[in-house]
Structure formats: structure tokens, C-alpha cells
Image: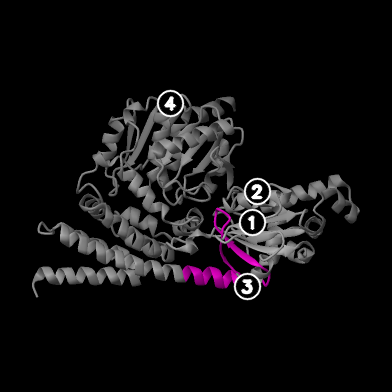
Amino acid sequence: MDVEQKQWDALIGRIYETALSPGDWGELLEPMVDWCQQEQQDLVSMESLLAHLDRAVRSSNHMHSQEDQNHLLNDMTNRLPWPMLMLDNQLHVVKHNSAADRIMTSGPLRMADGGALMLSDPKLKQQLQQVVRLQRGRDSQLLHSEQEKLVLLCMPVFRSDAPDEVSRITTVVWVFADRSVAAPSIQSLADLFGISPAEARLLHLLCKVGNLGQSAELLSVSVHTARTQLKSIMGKTGISSQVALVSRAMSHALLATPTLATHDGREERFMVLPDNRVLSWFEYGCPEGKPLLVMENQAGNLPCHEPHHQWYVSQGLRVLVVVRPGFGISTPCPDGNFVDFAADLRYFCERLNLQDPILAGYCFGGPYALAAAATYPSLFERVGVIGSIVPWQYMQAGQLDPMHNRLLKMVDRDPRLFISLGKLALRGVNRSPEKFFSFFSRVLDDKDASLINDPAVQAITLPQLRQRWFQGARVIIDDYLRVLRPWGFELADITIPTLVWHGALDRSVQLEPARLMAQAIPGARFHVLEDQGRYPVIECWREFIEDLAGSVSQTITQRA
């Protein structure tokens, strides 16, 4: 057997091993690129390789689907004995338990032949549509139908990346007759939310009667006292409305499981855009301060903004971390581009009445910030990016770390290779994100590797990965492909003051490509961080923001 055949056999074996152990997908990169770079590889050989990749992806997808179905179905089906429906975002029943068969043959809920859920109460249907489309956020919701004496307990769930019907499921719904829903006990509410006995008694009554005045009367306290206690409960739980508070308490009591919390306890705010898509964000700093819009990295994992909250306040900044399409509960737009998102940001600013906001972007968030600056120069005061991705025409072979260098060569050879490998990698990154960090750290300089493997950094990063990938990790592939395509705007069209910070030690996007991008932006100021690499936001975020929004802090100092 000649060397080429042995190399081919080893490559094919590695492909199928990756399907069985997707956490090791990184080990497939080098042999695949080495094989693709051989000059004698013709179209027939490439199609044969793609065929093997396709079979491996289908095998991995099947296992992915079975794992997710077992997790979702076993967990949800066995949790409660009541009728249960698993719905997609179009109100179609994807799966249901046997108890649901009885209620869908007659009554206020029916399932049409195509699986569409039919509801006799139009108001209830509208509310449920909002839930399955995440237009009410990611918290559990308790929906009441006065018309039908019906209660629906709705719980949005993490979406699967498996490419079959389980990936369609967005929400699990339990169906109750109105009188069958029991309020959680006072003690359980006190233990669950860490509230006082008096506050727990009030919340218990709110779950039973739903009316603050009536609850106050039953407790023999004034409405003012009840309102003060309710405000205290909201402050302790971080929940901003009575309806959301009662829904959270009831879902905890019925499901006996914690609802989804954000990575740092901050409320994930959201709005419904004119086309019914959802856009979410987090807020830090001074509510009346100068608005600073931050575009995050792919996982939204760095920087962690909570430790900077009081500093933002001292700087007079209202920091709004905008969650890009497909991440968190922001609606995915796989075919959208950077300029499309710029239009969303414009609506966001108008809706919140943000005056002359500043834009900041990090890593993959950089192109989104620059696109908004180029598209709506009169809307934003200035823009800054730190450690940003750059247009691929500035990237040359050898100017990337080994992993990204191989990925770029793979895309140049045939984009289908990159997409297939991405599909294999998704399951591995989902199941073992710590393996991804370990693999990725090998291609970083010593300082970056130390940072990414720091347990304190991972303690922040891993939970945020799960939060941001609520609708599936497939969005990462979409993000990469969007960066590889033409960006849809010209850097030369950015006419507002622009700041570009970049680490001299960055191996993923080296200094020269970043410098070329800065030079293409009229008047942009380029700042080199001599001792920083891919993660300058960990150590230099405050200095970057001070440079970008310096006049704001100077104004605060002068006032003081």
C-alpha cells in the first residue's frame, strides 16, 4: 500500500472517529488540510472526501438527536403527569405525551392533521405565540384563559442543534384545568427566593388570587405595605413585574427545578422588532448616563460586565450589551448580514431614545459595530473596536494561528469542507466546551493560553456559553461564514471618530491585518497593545472604554 493510500485511509478513519467522539474534532483539522493541499487531489477525490464527511455528519447527527431527545423527553415527560405538548415557534405540536391525546380530541385545544395546535381562545393563542417566539423572554410563563378556565404552564427550552424534529422544539407546555393548579407553599417560596416570611406570605397569596389589593386585605395589611413588600421581593429576585414574579414562583413549584438565570444575575431585557423578531440586551452602569452600545464576541463570554458595573456608574456610562441575532433569545437571521443588524440597532436606539450613543465591538462583534457606524454615521457619536476580526482580504496565509490558518485554507479549497467540519464540531463543543478551550489554547501564545485556561475565567465563560447558545450553537457557523463573505459596507464610509485597539501578540488576527483595517477607515486612530494577545478585554477593557468615551468621564470629573 503506497503512502498516499495510507494517508487517505488514516484521514477517513479519523473522520469517522470524530463522529463517535466529536469533542476531538480539532484533531481532524491538520490531516484534512494536509490532504487537501496535495496538488494531485482532483475533483473526484474531493467529492469522495465530501461524501465520507457527509456520512459521518449524518451518523453524528443521529447520535446527537437521540441524546437530545432522551434528555428532553425523559426529563420533561416524567416530570409531571399532566398533558404535555412540545411546540415549535409556529405553534405546531412536535411531540406530546399520552395524557395530551385525550385533551386534543375535543375541547379548547385541538391538533390539526398537520400538527398545528388550534386554540378556541384567541387571546390565549396570541399569548402562546409570543411565548414560543421568545417575545416574552426565556422565563417560564403561566397563561390563563378565563374563557375556557384553562391554565398553560410554558417553559422555553434550549434548542437542539440536531437536524431533525427535536431541533424544532422551542417550548414545553403543560395543560391544567384552572382549579388543578396549587399555589406553592409559604416555606418553599421563602427558601426558593431567599425572602422574608412576610414577603413569602404575600407571594403565596398573589399566586392564589393574583390581586395585590385582595392579597393585602387577606393579610390584614395596607396596600401600601403590600406594595412595599412586593418591591422588596422584586429587588431580591431581579424580576421586574408582578406577572413575571408569579409565573416564576408557579413554575418553580410545579416543575421543582430552577428557571433559567442569566450568567451574572442581570435581567435579559428584550424588545419585539417591527418584523416580529426579538432583540435582547443587558444593561449595566448609570440608567441616565451616556449610552454605550457593546457588540459581543461569539459566545458573549468576555468581558464579564458585572465587575465593571460600579465603575460604569462612576464614569457616567449606561452600558447596553446588545445580543446579536441567534445568540441568547435574539431571533436568528442566518442569511442576514452586518448591515441588516445595523438597521436593528437603529430601531433599538430610536425605541429607547438613545441620544448620540457610542459603539464598541470586541472580536466578532467588531464588524457589527463598524457596519452600524458606516451605515448610520449621524446616529452614533463614535466607534471603537478591540481585538476585532478584520475583513478576510487583509488576511494572508501564515498570518493566522495554526488552527485558523488551516480553517482558512480549507475554506479556500472548498467551503463545503468547512461547513461539514463545523457540523461535526457543534456536538463536541456543546457536549465538552472545556475540551474546546484546551484545544484552542494550544494555538495561542503563552499569556492567552494561561488566560483561557484560568479556572476563574472559565467559571465565567462556560455558563455564558450555555446562556448565549440558548437557540443552538449552529449560530457560530453562521457567524464565521458571514465574516468570510464580503461585509456589505465599505470601511471608507466610516466618517465618525474611530478607535482601533489590537494586541501585538495576537496570533488569530495578527497586528498587520488589523493595521490595514484601521488604515482603510478615514482618520481612525490605531493603538497597539504591546503585551496583549487575543483577549485584551480581560485586562484592558476599562482603559479601552476610557480612551473611547474619555470626554464623558472628564465631564463627570469636572462636575464633581
Nearest to viewer (mark 1 / mark 3)? 1
Foreground residue, 545 or 163? 163
Q: Residue 527 appears at what percent x and percent y?
A: 33, 35
Q: What stretch is highlighted in magenta?
A: 67-96
Determine whether 455 is above or below 63 in the image: above
Mark 4 residue type: Pro
Q: Residues at badges 4 and 3 in contact (C-beta under 8 Å)?
A: no
Q: Does the magenta stretch include residue 94?
A: yes
For the residues marked 2 and 4, what is the alpha-carbon distance in whole angstroms?
A: 38 Å
Q: Do the residues labelled 1 and 2 touch (CB within 8 Å)?
A: no
Instruction: Name which residue type carries label 1.
Output: Met
Nearest the viewer among 197 and 151 is: 151
Q: Nearer the viewer, mark 1 or mark 2?
A: 1
Q: Give the labeled residue for mark 2.
A: 126
- Rate crowding at label 3 as few (under 14), some (14 to 19) or many (20 or more) other CA atoms within 10 Å: few
Mark sitting earlier along the chain (1/2): 1
Figure quadrant of residue 512: top left
Determine crowd level at label 1: few under 14, some 14-19, many 20+ residues with C-alpha closer than 10 A. some
Read off the residue under disc 4.
377
**Is tag 1's residue or tag 3's residue first in the polypeptide sequence?**
3
For this view, does 397 lie left or right of residue 351? left
- Residue 98 is marked as 3
Q: Which of marks 2 and 4 is nearer the N terminus?
A: 2
Considering only vertical position in the picture, is 499 above or below 122? above
> For residue 367: magenta?
no
Q: Earlier along the polypeptide chain: callout 3 or callout 2?
A: 3
